[in-house]
Amino acid sequence: MKVTMRIRRFNPEKDKKPWWGEYTVDVEPTDRVLDALHQIKWYQDGTLTLRRSCAHGICGSDAMVINGRNALACKVLMRDVGEVCQVEPLRSMRIVKDLVVDMEPFFAKYRAVLPYLINEEEPPEKERLQSPEARERFDDTTKCILCAACTTSCPSYWANQDYIGPAAIVQAHRFIFDDRDRGALERLQILDDRDGVWRCRTVFNCVQACPRDIDVTKAIGEVKLAILEEL
Amino acid sequence: MVHHHRYETIVVGAGGAGLMAALYASQGSQTAVLSKLYPTRSHTGTAQGGIGAALGNLEEDRPEWHAFDTVKGGDYLSDQDAVEVMCYEAPGVVYELEHMGLPFNRTPDGRIAQRPFGGHTSNFGEKPVRRACYAADRTGHMILQTLYQQCIKRNVRFYDEFHVLDLLMSPDGRVAGVVAYEIDTGDLHVFHAKAVIFATGGFGRIWEITSNAHSLTGDGPAIVLRKGLPLEDMEFFQFHPTGIYKMGILITEAVRGEGGVLRNDLGERFMEKYAPNLKDLASRDVVSRAIYLEIKAGRGINGQKYVYLDATHLGREAIEKKLPDIADFCRTYLGIDPATQPIPVQPTAHYAMGGIPTDVHGQVRADAHGGIVPGFYAAGETACVSVHGANRLGTNSLVDLVVFGKRAGKAAAAYCGETDWPELPQETWEPVQAQIDRLLAQTGSKHVADIRSEMQSVMMEHVGVFRTAEGIQQALDKVRELQERMTDITVMDKGKRFNTELLEAMELSCLLDLAEVTAVSALARQESRGAHSREDFKERDDVNWLKHTFATRKDGKIELDYRPVVITKYQPKERTY
């Protein structure tokens, strides 16, 4: 089937401002949007630039805006995009080139929530014990692949990029509710801030955007509740 | 513009092996990690089913049994001293990962949960054993995340999206650093170092149907080859039995570990014929061959080139709880529900048993006769220790990268403490710049994508699950023709910023070089062993071929040498499952 791909292009080396490139691709209905982008890059215009790696929704490289919604290009099939498919870089991020955005501010926010197990007690010789129920408590947020689809779908983030954003809160949640961790209070203090969890207005865009089906808004709500209870 | 840096240890690659190496190297030396991807994009993250370790949490298990299974799985080509190191250290590193915070699934009494996996048995082959420690079906994702988290905690220095293009050697034959291309700016960076650890991953993109990421292009081994250093056992490449039909996306062996079975067009559970004891949980080479034979006999589904992986009897709850990502892949890419419909699968190029030869400390070998390259280390899929021999068991890649990543990191740090700074060669970045300039100046008529897909298709056809001398030779001729054709390509993007078209061309050169070595090594080995199955030499030949292949390139020609297999406890026996 033939599909028109409208792609937002911008190369700071030669373009003053972004422009729309239009390309026709011939694809199978079960091809991914990533396959269509590759078809353009490989056979029509080698300068089209994007990030990608695993091509099956695990590595988190190819988050972009597809027909207005944040998604991974390798997890959207061409049969679902219509005759014209519009592809843009993630919003609220500096564009490096075409569909590639500067991820550094995103990772800085990730690092700000202390995204690692904090527990200075001497570990046992074997594993620390953890009940299946305690493990289940934070299961959902362990799925995060740091693709930035949630954070860049959030109107609060669009309005103010000082907001720490849903992805960083998801990462904090993964540790706050892990009963092996001892750093919850520290993280809750970091998130109890004007630019922390309280900028979330429960719009649920993040939930729709998450390619890993994480219930992001619920996780944020649990962190808010923990702040009210613990601090 | 060229930038200069100096670190005692440079780690190239930020998957499981690279991050583990960085954690340990950075404890004893100034360390930086260079990765062409953001670390969390690395392919370790796609590993699904589990990491094997004889914890014995659910039933009796012993490292010794794990070692035997690994040696048998490797069709007796594994170096048994290295296998013992890996299997005896496996429980310790799994506990270490848990202490770092890795969220393993748990048994009712709170210990790390374990499940059966192909080729893993108790009491030397008696029956399947629960040895694979898992975090749902995203064990690799959790390992990658956990190790990256620890690197952040310990302030490890990262250079993300830096593509390493050359290894620097001092005039006295020591490693002296690397040259990297900063993807964002197109600038070159010279990293002067005492020790370099390659953890660059695999090269499954040589083949048409593969579970491997687009970025798995064997840059590390290709650089090694171009330096005149050997690559070991390149003829052994694993085809995982269950990739999604046509797409190659991995469907974990854990589906069979949890009770899933393979069925042909007649609905038969055909593995009963090929492996009466372990059936669907036989080792991967055995199962992949069985699928090919079923298809060849006309028993593929509707006569097509695939069979069914049937998990419909496991129940929805087990699938959603224990295999949630698999369920998601099936819904997304196939539009099916694995709780009610079977999954169409075919063997998919998955894992390089061969690679950069190392000893058990990750120290890179200079030849097949005991020589080493001072300061040079390798770990993970890019390395060949060799623990996997002719065929890797499921879950052992994750064990390998943690155990030997740690060992390489420690060894590099110790080496840095006892050596002075190596002299840089006269030319450092200049040859790389010349290579880039040449590629950008070319105005040929050929497409990188065409050359790549021709390579992938001929390698799939002739250097895949089954091989013959005639077929391998055809593939080799084709690959050499394609190498020639690379001088006639055009890179449209002439810019410096994020020029991924240029990088794809360079990556393809790496793949072509490795495809050539793979084919040459495969043509020479006149026997069938593990993943290397020759239709014209159907038997394993321990008299002539119980040895590792060492391939080097001298004056443009591949030369082969051999190194004996280290045997400690397990004499080669006939291999049945």
Image: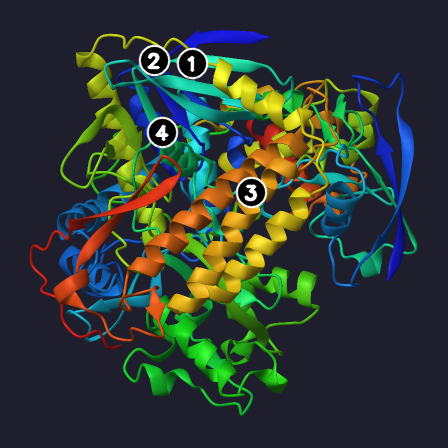
Q: Is residue B195 visible?
A: yes
Q: CA distance from mark 4 to mark 3?
A: 20 Å
Per the rendering, the mark at residue B246 is none
Q: Position of residue B2 (x, y in %)?
A: 55, 8
Which chain is disc 1 placed on? Answer: B
Give the SS element for disc 2: loop
Point out the frontmost of discs 3 and 1: 3
Distance in Å between CA atoms under marks 3 and 1: 32 Å
Residue at image mark 4? B227
Q: Residue at x 44, y 86 (%)?
A: B269
Which badge, 2 or 4, comes first in the chain's sequence? 2
**Label 3 SS:** helix
Q: Quadrant of residue B193?
A: top left
The kind of secondary structure element at disc 1 is strand
Image-based side of B338 in relation to B26, left or right: right
Mark found first going from the N terminus, 4 or 3: 4
The numbered mark, 1 or 4, whose residue comes first in the sequence reads 1
What colour scheme governs how the chains and residues are painted in the rendered image of this protein?
rainbow
Query: How far apart are labels 1 and 4 at the CA level?
Result: 17 Å
Amino acid found under the numbered disc labelled 4: Lys
State whether discs 1 and 2 lie on one chain: yes
| Chain to which the residue tagged by mark 4 belongs | B
The three-letter amino acid code for the residue at tag 1 is Phe
Q: Name the residue carrying label 1.
A: B191
Residue B484's disc number: 3
| Closer to viewer: mark 3 or mark 2 | 3
Is the residue at mark 3 from the same chain as the one at mark 2?
A: yes
Disc 3 + disc 2, Cβ < 8 Å = no
2 vs 4, front mark: 4
- Residue at mark 2: B30
Near mark 4 (Cα within 10 A), the count class, few <14, some 14-19 or many ≥20, is some
